Image (cartoon, helix red, strand yellow):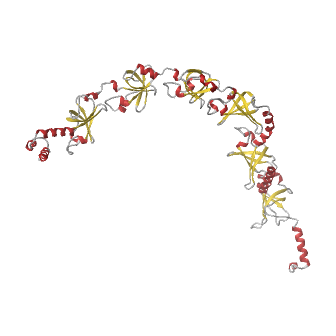
Amino acid sequence: MEIYKDLTSPASKEFEKLLNSQLSKINIEEGKVINGKINKITEKFVFLFIEGLKSEPVLDINELKSMGLSEKIKIGETISVLLEKIEDKNGEVLVSASKAQKIKGWDLLVEAYEKNEPIMGKITSKCKGGCIVEHIESGSLMFLPGSQISDKPLKDISHLMNEPQKFALIKLDKIRGNACVSRREIISSFKKEDKEKIISKYKVGDIIKGAEVKGYSTFGCFFNVNGELDVLCHTSELSYSRVNHADELFNIGDKVDLKVITVDKEKLQVGCSIKQLSQDPFEHIDNYELNKTYKVKIIKIMDFGAFAELEPGLTTLLHTSELSWTKKNVSAKKMFKVGDEVDCVITEIDKEKRRVAISHRLTQKNPFEILEKKFPVGTIVNGEVVNKNEYSLFIKIEDLEVDAFLHCNDLTYLNNGEDELEKYKKGDKLKVKVLEIKASEQKIRVGLRQTQPDPFDFFKDKKINQTLTVKIISTDNKGLVVRPENCEMDFNIKKSQIAINAADARPARFTGGERIDCAIADLDLEKRKVTLSIKLLEEIDRKAALEKYGAEGSGKNLPFSSLSEDLKKKDEDKE
């Protein structure tokens, strides 16, 4: 220890010089990747010798095996590690082989990205939106978007899994350490030269024979030409007629002739047209007349109708609503097939919108007009119940394919309409009266009760304030249900109309079956409305008594409890 007492002595200076010259040969820094030599192997650990460190770093054997370095676990082999800490709290050196491998792999990816060079990798698994690719050289993991797997849609990629192949680095985030690769770019680069040669064969104005419909998009239709080139035909170039979507005109696999209208050698794209192969049919649309019948050819059938041709290129829509007069929700698929020639009437020609509308049902006689002539309003006809819902029946009129509407309120005069409706079922034969015909709206209304005597005719010779004798049918808290003599209809007398005195206006006074007199308070023959009142009859009788008996004494003999008071009031009014 004597050498350290005097640091200015020649011996101390010589020792310092030797020490500095030795350490300067070894550059040891935390956070750097360094190489270590294996000098000892146990069952679980590997010990490394790294010159310049005071102790031997230790690695877990399982970590090395998981990295695919099993073959390097030998005495004397060199392994790259990341020096995390020269000395931790326990005085040990901390190193990591896996982190060193990632750093080295990232450096390789950065170098390849900057040089625009492809890398070798293999698809190891699928994930949301794409796949995970492992860099073969470093083991680094990268993301492969689904759109970058191939230059055409692939339903199954099992044949690509775990197969070494080239990938292009298309995005590198150095801050986050994320990498994005593309297999499609590698494939396209090989095809680009071939595609340039193929496209060079085409020029504007060329006619392509028998191109196959490959797929649709919202803006057009794709065709495959001779299995070597895909071309686009925009929706506006499909037909001179209005087309919302390509599937209205074509099915996948159809063969169609095309005309080349654009060639883009930079984007390697060819644009085509179908409608330019023929003259614009709207140039001679004046040859066709409204409301005249023409033969049309069915070219495509849809859920909402069918597309038909008046002539090649002049397409028109035959809507479902124009297929039949009587059938509801009729399907064009059940009536026609592609290629059928059908008689139709032109109902609209719109030159600005380049649209022609046609109707098939107008070529047939309108059964509603036939019915209007044969069975005018007021006619009684034979019918059959063909359908029923919660408030009406639908009646087929004789031998015509026409369904008439019969509301439950037109079933009977006497009972509740909804209750009466329950008595009827499909197939029942009825005699009904035609109440209303709207041929333009295809509506017919009929009634059953109108074929029967109207019990309301009982009131034809009656008038307001007339006295009626009625029979009490039933009573409740709200009033009485009564039926006039020689009448089949029941009427309600409200509780407030039973008597003048509130104490006497009790429905409970009656048990049912009694015959009493009442007066007609209101009568409307058109609205079929009648109001009956016992109270009104009492008021009429009281008024008559007052007019007949002028003296108070005479009034005392009348069977009205309040009559004397009324007479007294009358005398006071005279004075």
Q: In front: 347, or 424? A: 347
217 lies above or below 286: below
- The correct choice, above or below, for 112 with respect to 419 in the image is below
Asked which quadrant contains residue 49, the reply is: bottom right
Residue 90 visible in the snapshot: yes
Residue 31 rendering spot, x and y as whole percentages: 78, 61
Q: In the figure, 357 relative to 161: above or below? A: above
Residue at 78 percent of width and 34 percent of height: 199
Q: Of residues 35 and 262, which is closer to you in this image?
A: 262
Rendered location of residue 359, percent (x, y): 54, 25
- Give the quadrant of the N terminus: bottom right
Q: Residue furthest left?
A: 553
Quarter-of-image position of residue 54: bottom right
Q: In terms of depth relative to the viewer, which is nearer, 438 or 399?
A: 438
> Could you say where residue 470 lies in the image, as x and y percent from the top left?
22, 33
How many marks can you see? 0
Question: Which residue is rendered at x = 40% and y = 32% of the image?
Answer: 391
From the top left corner, tell me how far across and down residue 228 is, in percent: 76, 32
**In this picture, residue 553 sits left or right of residue 445:** left
Q: Name the one closer to the observer, 35 or 260.
A: 260
**Residue 300 seen by the camera:** no
Left or right of 273, for residue 308: left
Q: In percent of the image, x 16 and y 40: which residue is there?
A: 543
